[in-house]
Amino acid sequence: MLSEPRSGRLAAWGNALLAGLVSPDDAVLAIVGEDAVHRVEGLPGESAPVGLTLALGRLRALGVAGLRVALPAPGHPLGLSGPPEFNARALEAEEAVVCHGSAVGLVPEVHEAGPAGDVHAEVVWHVLPVRQAPPADVPSLGEAERELAEGLREATEVLSKLDVAGSGPVAEAAIDAYRARAERGREVLAPGYPPRAVRVLELARRVALLVSLAYDHGHGGAVSSAEMRARAEALRPVERTARRAQVAAFNAFVEERERGAR
């Protein structure tokens, strides 16, 4: 949850490119990020994988007008609309991009290579058919913001009960890393996104950080297996709230354009 999903970068900067707000070079640079290379496999009319620039242009030619994010988890098909094959691939990857305006979606497959300390990632986006239907369980930005406020309170209460709030240098390092990410957060949502989407994404990250701290460093008094299970049950709905808000933020570009077209 703390790292930005690749599907989020592809959707955000792909949307800005489709709207003519950024150049292809800038969009591809932002999407690839720290990865070595991204390629797209299975595009209609292409017999081999192609680069992102060509792929985004081909998607536009296919009628794609926007890109949405899905972040599914077991029992929670967040952002998905089917069919089963696409849902299964997206669930395995824990993320996907669903195209608006054409019945295709993209699921990333990540390959890591290189020696310790110098590992690089190569990403292949697999293009698969999707069902054109409303995505599952995606809230509006307003709903997501309200849910996050409650989720933040719940996460803080759980942390307090687990004695996690002052859990030492490891937790402090995680908080410092979050602050560094927050400083870069405004660059994640590309030009054209509403300020509220940026705000919701930043708050979702904060909630996700607290959940991560509770899972990774929050042993505190919860030492028995029963207490560990109780902690996981208490945190699960908060984690789901953060994922729902993250999807709402990334999908806000398409949602706003759809409302404006009505």
Image (cartoon, helix red, strand yellow):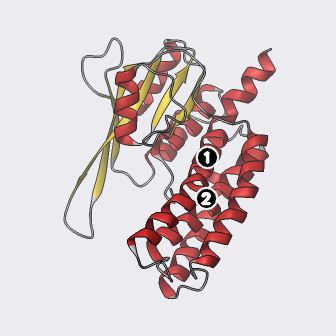
Left or right position of 168 against 250: left
Above or below, comparing residue 28 to residue 88 in the picture: below
Left or right position of 14 against 152: left
Tell me residue 160's x, y (percent): 64, 78
Residue drawn at (78%, 49%), measured in percent from left and top?
Answer: 146
* Amino acid on which disc 1 is placed: Gln
Residue drawn at (47%, 77%), measured in percent from left and top?
Answer: 217
Give the structural element (helix, strand or loop) at label 1: helix
Q: Mark 2 or mark 1, which is nearer the start of the sequence?
A: 2
Q: Quadrant of residue 260?
A: top right
CA gap, disc 1 to disc 2?
Answer: 8 Å
Above or below, comparing residue 159 to residue 76 in the picture: below
Tell me residue 7's x, y (percent): 48, 40
Q: Residue furthest front?
A: 226
> Looking at the image, which is closer to me, 92 or 179?
92
Tell me residue 126's x, y (percent): 34, 29
Give the structural element (helix, strand or loop) at label 2: helix
Graded by Cα atoms within 10 Å as few (under 14), some (14 to 19) or many (20 or more), the crowding at tag 2 reads: many
Q: Are marks 1 and 2 in contact (CB under 8 Å)?
A: yes
Residue drawn at (45%, 18%), measured in percent from left and top?
Answer: 130
Which of the numbered marks, if any, corresponds to residue 205? Answer: 2
Above or below, comparing residue 174 to residue 52 in the picture: below
Residue occupied by mark 1? 246
* Amino acid on which disc 2 is placed: Arg
Residue drawn at (41%, 55%), measured in percent from left and top?
Answer: 34
Graded by Cα atoms within 10 Å as few (under 14), some (14 to 19) or many (20 or more), the crowding at tag 1 reads: many
Which of the numbered marks, if any, corresponds to residue 261? Answer: none
